[in-house]
Image: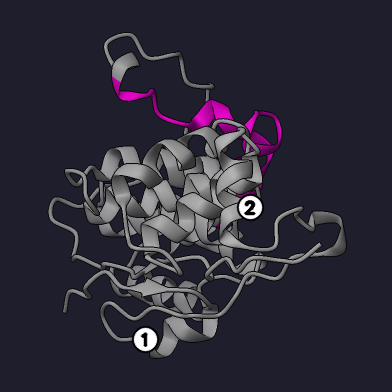
Amino acid sequence: MKLRLALLCTASALAAATPNAQSDAPIKITAAERVPWSNLAELERYAANGHLKACAQLGEQLARGDGVPPDTTRALPLLERAARGGIGSAAFRLGMIYDEGQGVPPDRRRALDYFRAAAAAGEAEGFFNVGAAYVGAHGVKRDYTEGLAWLLLAAERGAGGDTVQTVRARIQKLRHPEWITAAEARAPAIALELAAAQPTSFLPALPEESASPAPKPKTIAPPALPKITTPPALDLPVLSPPQITPATP
C-alpha cells in the first residue's frame, strides 16, 4: 500500500505521523550560533544586508508562514542565497519547496539535489529524504540499495525512526538480501563522498544557469545489483526540519 508524502520533523514523529503532519518544535541554537537580531524588523534588516543566517531564517519563516504571511516568491531568493553560502537548512527547505510544488512547479529531481546538498552540510533529514527518494522513485530511478544506504546514514544521525527496519523487511520480502549487504558497504562510501566535497557543489544550477549547468562532483557508483522489472512501490514520508524560532543575543 503506497504511503503519501508527509511533513515530519523527528524520528518519533515518523512512526506516528499522518499525511501532511507538521511540527512546531523549534530548532535549538547553541551559544556559538546566537544571532544579532531579536525581532522581525531586525531580522529583515540583516537579511537585506545579506547576512546568511538571517536569509535562511527569514526565508524559512516566509516559506512556512511562521510569524509572517507565507510568501514563497520572497522566500526563494533568500533561501537560495543562504544555501549557496553553505547553510544546510536553507538547502533543505528549498528541497521541500520543489518536492511539494509550494508556489513553484513540482520538480523532484531538483529537490533531490537540494536534499543531497543539505545532507552534505550535515542535515540529518537531508540524508533521509535522499534515501526516501531512491526507495520511492521520486525524481530518480528506484534503487533499494542506494536508498537503504542513505537511510542507514540518516539513522546514525537520529532521523527516520524505524524506517531502516521497514526497508530491510521489504528487501527481504523481495528475496534480495544481497542488496542489504551492498547498502551497508555503500553507506561509508557515501559519507566519504560528502566529506570530500563542498556542500554547495551538490546544489542544482539556478534557473538562469540551467542551459549550461556547472559540472557535478564525481560519485562512486553503487555496486551492480540484480534488477527487478516492476519492483513493488514503497514510498517513504519526507522529513521536514523543525521550525526555526528567532534567538536573542
Q: Circle 2: is it few (<14), some (14-19), or many (20+) Cα within 10 Å?
A: few
Three-letter code for the amino acid on which mark 1 is drawn: Ala
Residue 182 magenta-drawn? no
Residue at the farthest front position: 41
Residue at the farthest bottom position: 16
Q: Is residue 230 visible?
A: yes
Nearer the observer, 46 or 235: 46
Three-letter code for the amino acid on which mark 2 is drawn: Glu
Q: Secondary structure at mark 2?
A: helix
> Disc 2 or 1, which lies upstream in sequence?
1
Numbered label tally:
2
Q: Nearer the viewer, mark 2 or mark 1?
A: 2
Q: Read off the magenta span.
A: 184-207
Quadrant of the drawing holding the N terminus? bottom left
Nearer the observer, 105 or 193: 105
> In screen coordinates, is 201 left or right of 230?
right
Residue visible at 25% across and 51% down? 138
Q: Which residue is mark 2?
A: 42
Residue visible at 54% across and 38% down? 83
Image location of residue 232, percent across then percent down: 18, 65
The figure's colour scheme reads: one colour
> Which mark is drawn over residue 17?
1
Image location of residue 152, percent across then percent down: 56, 62
Residue 185 magenta-drawn? yes
Image location of residue 106, percent across then percent down: 19, 47
Q: CA distance from mark 2 to mark 1?
A: 35 Å
Q: Secondary structure at mark 1?
A: loop
Nearer the observer, 211 or 42: 42
Q: In the displayed structure, would residue 153 be above or below residue 143? A: below
Which of the 4 image quadrants contains residue 48? Answer: top right
